[in-house]
Image: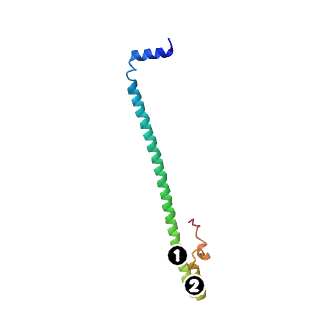
């Protein structure tokens, strides 16, 4: 007698042959459930990463707005200090029209802003 024949004989005597279809159906359900759990876990990780990215973008935008307001205050203070000297006021007004050229005295303490 071959080992396969012994297995077949044992399954027929024990009645496990009748339960084979149920076992295979339950096995397929288990595999499907594991795939759903895996998918939901991956989705949860993805949503967490998106949430962190949005939070970082929000913080960066708030920092940018805060620095913009600080720059406007600095420029207005700088211009207020120059009102008494009209020759320098025209120079500073020219700087105001070209935002790429910032006042060295105002921007020395500002951190670099990535736009």
Q: Position of residue 106 (x, y in %)?
A: 58, 75
User: Which residue is found at the position 50% from the left and 56% from the top?
Assistant: 53
Q: Which mark is residue 45?
A: none
Q: Nearer the viewer, residue 36 or 65?
A: 36
Measuring from the top left, give residue 104's x and y in whole percent: 62, 75
Query: In the depicted view, which residue is nearer to us: 113 or 11?
Result: 11
50 over 6 or under it: above or below = below
Q: Position of residue 64 (x, y in %)?
A: 52, 67
Question: Mark 2, residues whose alpha carbon is within 10 Å: few (<14), some, or many (≥20)?
Answer: some
- Determine the residue positioned at 40% across, 27% down: 23
| Residue positioned 42% across, 18% down in the render | 11
Element type at mark 1: helix
- Answer whether residue 82 is visible to the viewer in this image: yes
Disc 2: which residue: 82
Quadrant of the frame with the C terminus? bottom right
Q: Earlier in the sequence, mark 1 or mark 2?
A: 1
Q: Which residue does the image show at 39% across and 30% down from the upper left? A: 25
Q: Quadrant of residue 111?
A: bottom right
Q: Which residue is mark 1?
A: 72
> Up-down: is 2 above or below 105?
above
Quarter of the image where one finds residue 71? bottom right
- Name the secondary structure under disc 2: helix
Q: Is residue 39 above or below residue 105?
A: above
Q: Locate residue 67, reporting x and y percent.
A: 53, 70
Separation (CA) of disc 1 from disc 2: 15 Å
Q: Is residue 29 above or below residue 57?
A: above
Q: Is the C-beta separation of discs 1 and 2 under 8 Å?
A: no
Can residue 85 be seen? no
Q: Residues within 10 Å of mark 1 (few under 14, many from 20)?
A: few
């Amino acid at each position: 007698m071959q080992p396969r024949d012994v297995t077949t004989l044992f399954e027929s005597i024990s009645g496990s042959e009748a339960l084979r279809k149920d076992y295979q159906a339950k096995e397929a359900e288990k595999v499907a459930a594991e795939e759903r759990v895996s998918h939901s876990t991956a989705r949860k990780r993805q949503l967490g990463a998106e949430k962190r990215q949005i939070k970082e973008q929000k913080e960066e935008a708030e920092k940018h707005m805060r620095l913009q307001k600080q720059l406007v205050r600095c420029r207005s203070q700088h211009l207020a200090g120059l009102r008494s000297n009209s020759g320098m006021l025209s120079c500073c007004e020219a700087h105001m029209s070209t935002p790429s050229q910032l006042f060295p005295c105002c921007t020395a303490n500002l951190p670099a802003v990535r736009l």
